[in-house]
Image (cartoon, rainbow, N blue to C red):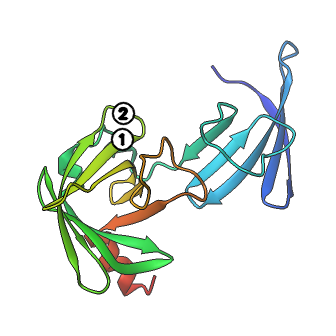
């Protein structure tokens, strides 16, 4: 179904407002406010004002992610995790995770220290749940995981005691990129 639509946009501070109306007489006008979080994520809310504190659990806020490769849309598996993932905070850091196989992971820190752990991931939950159990201890980290692309993941909860329910704007989110992408970003000075 194709709808003929008129729209107007205007920007104020960090938000872009969109007012659109359908040319068919039986349709109402609608308004949305859009905030671009980065070059691949935007928020849309059908209110007069974007909330200051954004909670993506709010059913009135829609989160849109740019799909980098539409052909690669699939439910992730442990195979997608296996590899070397570098933390990316403004630039690639020395902190990285090596998912060795479907149950072992190594945390490597900038100072060269390493921690061996096992992991269990549940791809049936939204967001995905991942638990890390450090070898030789009873220490367990309950985190959440999300693939933002084939070579990009977010993990939240590594610094928390309890597993977060969702990703938040100013939360304990860690962005990791897989090794081939990390090497390209390092070569570009990013």
Q: Nearer the viewer, residue 113 or 98?
A: 113
Per the image, label 2 sits on a secondary structure element best described as: loop
Locate residue 65, reporting x and y percent.
53, 48
Q: Name the residue that disc number 1 marks.
A: 128
Q: Residue at x 42, y 84 (%)?
A: 188
Q: Nearer the viewer, residue 133 or 91?
A: 133
Q: Residue at x 50, y 43 (%)?
A: 166
Residue 89 is tagged as none
Locate residue 51, reporting x and y percent.
78, 46
- Say few, some or many: other residues with alpha carbon within 10 Å of mark 1 (under 14 / 14 to 19 / 20 or more): some
Do the numbered discs 2 and 1 sit on residues whose CB atoms are within 8 Å?
yes
Q: Residue at x 42, y 46 (%)?
A: 163
Please state if 61 lies on the left or on the right of 143 as rendered.
Answer: right
* Quadrant of the image containing the N terminus: top right
Q: CA distance from mark 2 to mark 1?
A: 5 Å
Locate residue 124, reporting x and y percent.
31, 31
Q: Residue furthest front?
A: 138
Residue 125 is tagged as 2
Locate residue 7, reporting x and y percent.
83, 39
């Amino acid at each position: 179904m194709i709808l003929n639509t008129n729209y107007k946009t205007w920007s104020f501070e960090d938000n872009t407002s969109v007012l659109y109306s359908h040319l068919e007489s039986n349709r109402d006008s609608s308004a949305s406010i859009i905030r671009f979080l980065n070059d691949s994520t935007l928020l849309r809310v059908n209110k007069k004002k974007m909330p200051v504190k954004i909670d993506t659990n709010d059913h009135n806020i829609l989160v849109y992610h740019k799909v980098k490769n539409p052909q690669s849309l699939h439910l992730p598996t442990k195979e997608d995790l296996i590899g070397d993932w570098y933390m990316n905070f403004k630039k690639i850091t020395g902190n990285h995770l090596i998912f060795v196989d479907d149950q072992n992971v190594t945390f490597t820190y900038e100072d060269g220290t390493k921690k061996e752990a096992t992991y269990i991931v549940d791809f049936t939950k939204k967001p995905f749940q991942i638990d890390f159990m450090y070898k030789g201890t009873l220490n367990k980290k309950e985190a959440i995981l999300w693939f933002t692309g084939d070579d990009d993941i977010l993990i939240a909860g590594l610094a928390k005691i309890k597993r977060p329910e969702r990703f938040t704007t100013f939360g304990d989110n860690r962005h990791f990129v897989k090794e081939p992408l990390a090497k390209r970003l390092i070569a570009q000075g990013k």
